[in-house]
Image: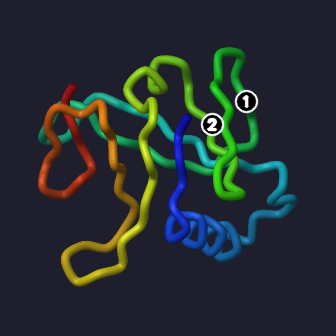
Amino acid sequence: MIYVSDKAREKVAKLMQDASIENASEYFLRVSVVGGGCSGLSYKLDFDNESKPMDQVFEDNGVKVVTDLKSFLYLVNTTLDFSDGLNGKGFYFSNPNASRTCGCGESFAV
């Protein structure tokens, strides 16, 4: 499961509205893990409306989240959150599988 905090849910809804995505109910948040970043692996977020055969689909807090199977292995029980505080602004992940994360919160290692 991938979890979505209340703040992240609000921000996702706002971004979809700002992007004027028509038929918003057909779109979902695609979360993936890609190589790169200062810790070796980075998170990637996109809006998408096309599922792939091996996608893992979840819904939490009213947000449909989809990830590919390979990324899911790194994301099990991860929570997507959003911060708008002075120390950083943006989405970040609370990932119990990460052995270390970078200061910016955008990359991790296992």
Q: CB of mark 1 within 8 Å of CB of mark 2?
A: yes
Residue 38 in the image: x percent, y percent?
A: 12, 41
Q: Position of residue 57 (x, y in %)?
A: 68, 32
Could you tell whether 68 is left or right of 36 in the image?
Answer: right
Please determine whether, in this image, residue 34 is positioned above or below residue 4: above
The residue labelled by disc 1 is: 51
Q: Residue at x 83, y 63 (%)?
A: 22
Q: CA distance from mark 1 to mark 2?
A: 8 Å
Residue type pointed to by label 2:
Val
Q: Position of residue 78 (x, y in %)?
A: 42, 41
- Other residues around mark 2 within 10 Å, as few (<14) / some (14–19) / many (≥20): many
Q: Is residue 87 above or below residue 74?
A: below
Assign a secondary structure to mark 1: loop
Residue 37 occupies which quadrant of the picture?
top left
Residue 75 versus residue 52 in the image, above or below: below
Instruction: Specify the quadrant that holds the N terminus.
Output: top right
Q: Quadrant of residue 58?
A: top right
Q: Quadrant of the C terminus?
A: top left
Q: Label 1 sits on what residue type?
A: Ser
19, 107: nearer the viewer: 107
Q: Quadrant of residue 12?
A: bottom right
Q: Earlier in the sequence, mark 1 or mark 2?
A: 1
Q: Residue at x 65, y 49 (%)?
A: 60
Residue at 74 percent across and 35 percent down: it is 50
**Seen in the image, is 92 located left or right of residue 13?**
left
Reply above or below: 33 against 16. above
Query: How many residues crowd mark 1 within 10 Å: few (<14), some (14–19), many (20+)?
Result: some
Please give the label number shown on residue 86: none
Q: Secondary structure at mark 2?
A: strand
Residue located beneath label 2 in the image: 66
The answer to whether 80 appears left or right of 101 in the picture is right
Name the side, left or right, on which 71 lies relative to 48: left
